[in-house]
Amino acid sequence: MNFLKVIFFVFIKDIKDELRRKENILSSLFFQLLSLVLIHFAVDMTSIDLSKEGAGLMWLIIIFAGTIFMQNIFRKEEENGVFLALLLAPVDRAAIYLAKFFVSFIFLTILEVFLFFLSFFFFGAAVFDSPLQLLILAIGVNVGFSALGTLISSLLINQKGSSILYPLLLYPLLFPLFAAAAALTQSTLKSSLAFSDPWLRLIILFDIIFLAVSSMLFESAVEE
């Protein structure tokens, strides 16, 4: 089967399945909403500059909410035996990985749009002053996050205690990506996103390296 057709087929199957089952999506969105509500009541709005601390808080929420979704992205196929059928099919396994990657990427983008809107509602953060720049930043972060999150989820598909191992493996690798994202969000909320910023170059380099490496390692990961 054509490489692009495989990506499209698996992508559509997963989107339909997620919309039908809903538990991963709803649990992630509920966690995000609950986190913002708790922060809203815990933070003294008069003593904190949310264009600084708020940036780190937003990305921290995205890490945890995204983890809830991505650590289960292969589990439904494993439970139903569909994943084994996909691996036995005469298709390029990189196409399966990329389809899962795009599902994670789309979900994270929706999650972040929802988060930025709620941040404006709860904190009055100036996210609508530069929405296009924040969207570009979010897309850059989502590529690296989805690439790594999808690969590690496939590595742990048959492992006991995968829900504990998943964040332990993922978060240290994501640290440079989200440190750069927090720093760039601060500067964007204050002024504008500078495309010559070294933090942005770090995100682009991170995305290229880990998306390429994850695509190549996926076949070895699922054979174990």
Image (spheres, rainbow, N blue to C red):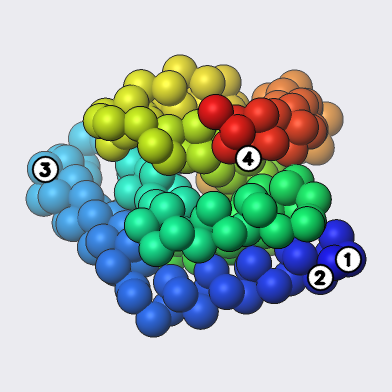
Mark drawn on residue 214: none
User: Alpha-carbon distance for marks 2 and 1?
Assistant: 5 Å
- Expressed as whole percent of the image width and height from the top left, the position of residue 126 reads 48, 56
User: Alpha-carbon distance for marks 3 and 2?
Assistant: 49 Å
Q: Earlier in the sequence, mark 2 or mark 4?
A: 2
Q: Amino acid at mark 4?
A: Ala
Say which residue label 4 marks.
Answer: 147
Report the residue that reaches farthest toward the right: 2
Mark 2 and mark 1 residues within 8 Å of each other at the beta carbon: yes
Q: Earlier in the sequence, mark 4 or mark 3?
A: 3
Left or right of residue 130: residue 58: left
Label 1 SS: loop
Mark 2 residue crowding within 10 angstroms, few (<14) / some (14–19) / many (20+): few
Say which residue label 2 marks.
Answer: 5
Q: Amino acid at mark 1?
A: Asn
Q: Earlier in the sequence, mark 3 or mark 2?
A: 2
41 w.r.t. 214: above or below: below
Mark 3 and mark 2 residues within 8 Å of each other at the beta carbon: no
Q: Amino acid at mark 3?
A: Ala
Mark 1 residue crowding within 10 angstroms, few (<14) / some (14–19) / many (20+): few
Say which residue label 1 marks.
Answer: 2
Mark drawn on residue 42: 3
Label 3 SS: helix
Image quarter hosting the N terminus: bottom right
Image quarter hosting the C terminus: top right
